[in-house]
Amino acid sequence: MERLARLIEEDECSAKCEKYADELKELSDEMDETTLCKFGPLLFKAIADPNRLKILKILAIREMCVCELNVALNISQGTISHHLKILQEAKLIKGRIKGKWNYYQVNGKHVEKFIQNSEQFLKKYYSN
């Protein structure tokens, strides 16, 4: 964008460049309003941590409480709770309280499918 602005200022570009720059800016502004651009960073932050991915894969098998995740992953309950909070904020998991225990599960079949599709993509493009 800086290069284009410089070309316009130096008069090396016609009025068409200005119109093109305006169209690009409008396109960029429209992209800011898309669901992916608005909420994608929240989702991708949530899945950027290997432990959160492990939690997702485990919860895709079945609902579990924090203490089960603690045993499965050998991570402190406080750390697991932190990861669960991030996954909940991204709407990837949901929790429920039963007595003294908090149970968590993936937030529907679409999350399970997302995990499967991500795994397939990674195997196809990142495997040796």
Image: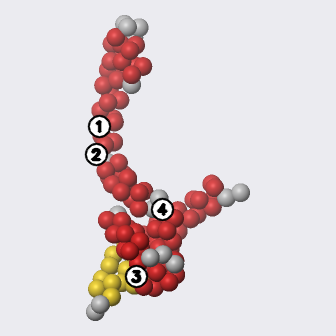
Q: Amino acid under label 1?
A: Asp
Looking at the image, which residue is at 49% across and 68% down? 51
**How far apart are the two marked residues, 2 and 1, measured between alpha carbons?**
7 Å
Question: In the picture provided, is 17 more to the left or to the right than 75?
Answer: left
State whether residue 25 appears in this view: yes
Looking at the image, which residue is at 39% across and 59% down? 43
State whether residue 110 appears in this view: no
**Labelled disc at residue 29:** 1
Circle 2 packing at 10 Å, graded few (<14), some (14-19), many (20+), is few
**How far apart are the two marked residues, 4 and 2, measured between alpha carbons?**
26 Å
Dot 3 or dot 1, earlier in sequence:
1
**Labelled disc at residue 66:** 3
Which residue is the site of mark 2? 33
Dot 4 or dot 2, earlier in sequence:
2
Q: Residue 62 at x, y = what percent?
A: 46, 84
| Tag 2 near tag 1, CB within 8 Å | yes
**How far apart are the two marked residues, 2 and 3, measured between alpha carbons?**
36 Å
In front: 11, or 43? Answer: 43
Which residue is the site of mark 4? 49
